[in-house]
């Protein structure tokens, strides 16, 4: 090999090393940019919050979602049916390319309150609240009242006062009969216990308390009052659609002793409008 050929080979090797180094540096810079650039995170949070807002419009009754994901040091704005997420240093009005933006659908029956949740030295984890016809994004610790499952402005004072009760399974039969007798004596009504076509079926549940309730507003109001009475005592009660014209109350065994008092207070409130 001549000296000229050797120099040429060394030059080629050096060029390849330089090219490889440039490629490596470019890849490193690209990865570093991805690691330090939070645009993906902001877009993800905006989309996730938008989906959460759409989801809370579906359940029956009022709903509260505590958004648990870490929002780091971002500020969040809800306006014009969209979520905007941006870093605090981008304030007050960062360009669109510095924000994570996602739109959400709001049913015509709901009003969404425009809300600006600004970074205050810690990650903001909004509370999403659905009450009646309003959707709200609130800061944790903010005073709010969802009135639980209450349905407003429904006059039930003229509703029937002769509901029929039944029990399932059989071991609750005597208990429900006693409950009906107590309600009749305390409220001066004419509730009855009967096996066929009851308005209320009361059964024992192993793990959870559920009220399956008809779709009418007045009956949903009664279900909401019953649920509220339990919730005020620190118990969890779900309200779900029954699919027919009767209530089915599934209650944990440990709460059966409280049911008579809960029903008494609930019907008293219900009949008073």
Image: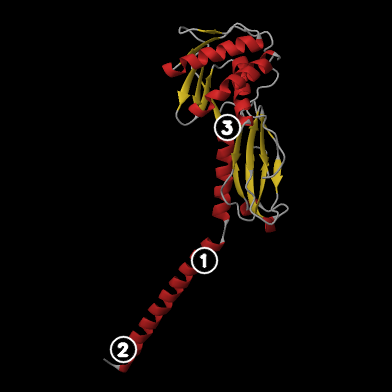
Q: Is residue 33 above or below residue 191?
A: below
Residue projecting furthest to the left: 1
Left or right: 257 as drawn, with respect to 207: right
User: What SS does tag 2 mark?
Assistant: helix
Residue 18 visible within the image: yes
The label on residue 153 is none
| Residue 112 x %, y % | 67, 34
**Pointers 1 and 2 in contact (C-beta within 8 Å):** no
Res. 5 mark: 2
**Residue 10, image x and y in percent?**
35, 86
Q: In the figure, is residue 104 to the left or right of 12?
A: right
Q: CA distance from mark 3 to mark 1?
A: 50 Å
Q: Quadrant of the N terminus?
A: bottom left
Q: Name the front one of labels 2 and 3.
A: 3
Q: Earlier in the sequence, mark 2 or mark 3?
A: 2
> The C terminus is located in which quarter?
top right
Q: Earlier in the sequence, mark 1 or mark 2?
A: 2
Using the numbered discs, state the Cα–Cα distance from disc 2 to disc 3 in whole angstroms.
88 Å
First of labels 3, 1 by sequence position: 1
- The residue that disc 3 covers is 235
The residue lying toward the viewer, choosing from 273 and 181, is 181
What residue is shown at x 31% (from left), y 89% (from top)? Answer: 5
Q: Which mark is residue 32?
A: 1
């Amino acid at each position: 090999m001549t000296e000229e050929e050797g120099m040429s080979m060394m030059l080629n090797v050096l060029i390849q090393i330089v090219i490889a180094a440039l490629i490596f540096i470019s890849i490193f810079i690209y990865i570093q940019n991805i690691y330090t650039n939070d645009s993906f995170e902001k877009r993800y949070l905006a989309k996730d919050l938008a989906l959460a807002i759409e989801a809370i419009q579906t359940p029956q009754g009022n709903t509260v979602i505590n958004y648990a994901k870490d929002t780091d040091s971002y500020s969040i704005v809800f306006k014009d049916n969209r979520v905007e997420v941006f870093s605090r240093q981008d304030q007050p009005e960062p360009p669109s390319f510095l924000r994570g933006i996602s739109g959400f659908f709001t049913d015509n029956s709901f009003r969404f309150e425009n809300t600006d949740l600004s970074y205050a030295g810690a990650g903001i984890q909004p509370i999403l609240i659905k009450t009646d016809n309003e959707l709200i994004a609130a800061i944790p610790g903010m005073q709010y009242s969802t009135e639980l499952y209450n349905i407003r402005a429904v006059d039930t004072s003229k509703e029937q006062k002769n509901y029929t009760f039944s029990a399932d399974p059989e071991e609750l039969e005597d208990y429900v009969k006693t409950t009906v007798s107590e309600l009749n004596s305390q409220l001066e009504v004419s509730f009855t216990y009967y096996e066929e076509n009851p308005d209320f079926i009361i059964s024992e549940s192993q793990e959870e308390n559920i009220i399956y309730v008809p779709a009418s507003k007045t009956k949903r109001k009664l279900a909401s009052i019953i649920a509220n009475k339990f919730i005020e005592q620190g118990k969890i009660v779900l309200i779900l659609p029954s699919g027919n014209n009767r209530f089915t109350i599934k209650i944990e065994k440990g709460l059966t002793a409280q049911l008579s008092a809960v029903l008494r207070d609930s019907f008293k409130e219900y009949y008073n409008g």
